[in-house]
Amino acid sequence: VVVNKFSLLLNVNVQRTGNVFNTPVKLTTGFDCPVCSKFVCSDEIDVHFLMCFSKPRLLYNDDVLSRDSGECSICLDDMVQGDTIARLPCLCVYHKGCVDEWFEVNRSCPEHPTDSH
């Protein structure tokens, strides 16, 4: 199987008179967006990129956690007193480092991806 960023090709071996031929067969056309990680069909690439790259990254307030507060749903580790946290506009709270890494490839809350805060 050969995969590139715009199409998924399957090399089919065709046997004829002792010779083997590689014939690419197109299964699907598209790619996973590097910004939002959604699968995008090739005929929607331009519109999707315009939407994805023009959507602003969420801003958040950072703070130091004053008491233990459950688990970070990004890394699944406990958030404990003294951890630096990020509070998003939807009021979700994560480790600051976790949400910073999340925002390197996403532009929305991990738990509320369709919210437009």
Image (spheres, helix red, strand yellow):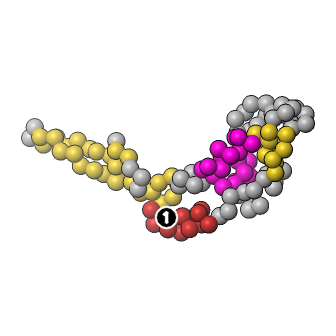
Q: Which amino acid type corresponds to the residue marked 1 in the rendered image?
A: Ile
Specify the segment rendered in magenta.
96-113
In the shown orientation, is residue 4 left or right of residue 73?
left
Q: Is residue 110 magenta?
A: yes
At horizontal 75% and vertical 56% (from top left) the residue drawn is 59
Find residue 48 and report its horizontal and vertical position in percent: 55, 64
Left or right placement of residue 29 versus residue 61 in this view: left
| Residue 38 visible in the displayed image | no
Question: Do we see residue 63 in this rendering?
Answer: yes
Give me the residue at 53% from left, 55% from top: 33
Q: To which residue does mark 1 refer? A: 45
For the residue labelled by badge 1, is the local secondary structure a helix, a strand or a loop? Answer: helix
Tally of numbered discs:
1
Residue 29 percent coordinates (x, y): 41, 57
Residue 71 place in picture, x, y as percent = 79, 34
Residue 94, image x, y percentages: 77, 42
Going 90% across and 34% down the picture, which residue do you hit? 67
Q: Is residue 107 above or below residue 96?
A: below
Q: Quadrant of residue 96?
A: top right
Horizontal side of residue 67 vs 27, given as left or right: right
Q: Quadrant of the N terminus?
A: top left
Q: Quadrant of residue 6?
A: bottom left
Of residue 82 and residue 89, the one placed in the foreground of this image is: 82
